[in-house]
Image: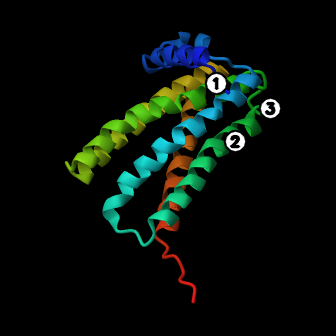
Amino acid sequence: MISWAELRLACRGLLHLIRFDAQFVRHFDRSVAGALRSFWLALFILPYEILSTYLVALPHNLPSMGFFLAADVIGYLLGWTLFPLLLLSLERTLDREREMPGCIAVLNWSSLIGIALQLPSLLILFLGFGEDFATGIAYTGVLFGAAIEAFLIAQCLRVPAWQAAILAVVDIVIGFALMHLIVALGHVPVPKVG
């Protein structure tokens, strides 16, 4: 479980990270135990994920909101596991076995930055200022988040910027693929029994 002290320290690290300050790495437990503990964030962020999905899906008259939310939770769990598993599969190729747990830990913590970047678009959507405007703000957040993630990967794994950028783009592609899967599953009408 994540301690209060670890949370405070990680938040300090995240403030360094959003300023692209390489000192962010000092604020995280980058051990295997720290990486495993960082997955507890998924549980704490899940209510936010469900609420944000509900707000985005609400105006679309889905056949079954419950089915859509179930698809979202499955996609959410896949989102927390697929990219870390990909990184673990690359650790020998990149010759970064020692650095990989720390990178995964910081990536998990950086999901809090992702939430902060999504909040303005969700607020715009909730207040009814227009879906196109909210989408534009969301994509701006995605671009900034990608830059942060590439910097994070480059610093944690000590790889060239181009490799870090490719990995960040792969993570974003995985995220968008999961989002489209959620939408596709969520729009499927629930079969009626009887």
Q: Nearer the viewer, residue 4 or 102?
A: 4
Q: Secondary structure at mark 2?
A: helix
Q: Secondary structure at mark 3?
A: loop
Task: Give percent across and percent down for residue 41.
Answer: 59, 33
**Is 9 rendered above or below residue 127?**
above
Task: Give percent across and percent down for residue 107.
Answer: 59, 30
**Is 167 rendered above or below residue 159?**
below
Q: Nearer the viewer, residue 64 or 75?
A: 64
Image disc number at residue 2: 1
Reading the image, the residue beneath label 3 is 92
Could you tell whether 35 is left or right of 112 in the image? right
Question: Which mark is in front, 2 or 3?
Answer: 2
Question: What amino acid does circle 1 point to?
Answer: Ile
Pointer 2 or 3: first along the chain: 2
- Identify the residue at image location x=43%, y=52%: 53
- Identify the residue at image location x=70%, y=23%: 34
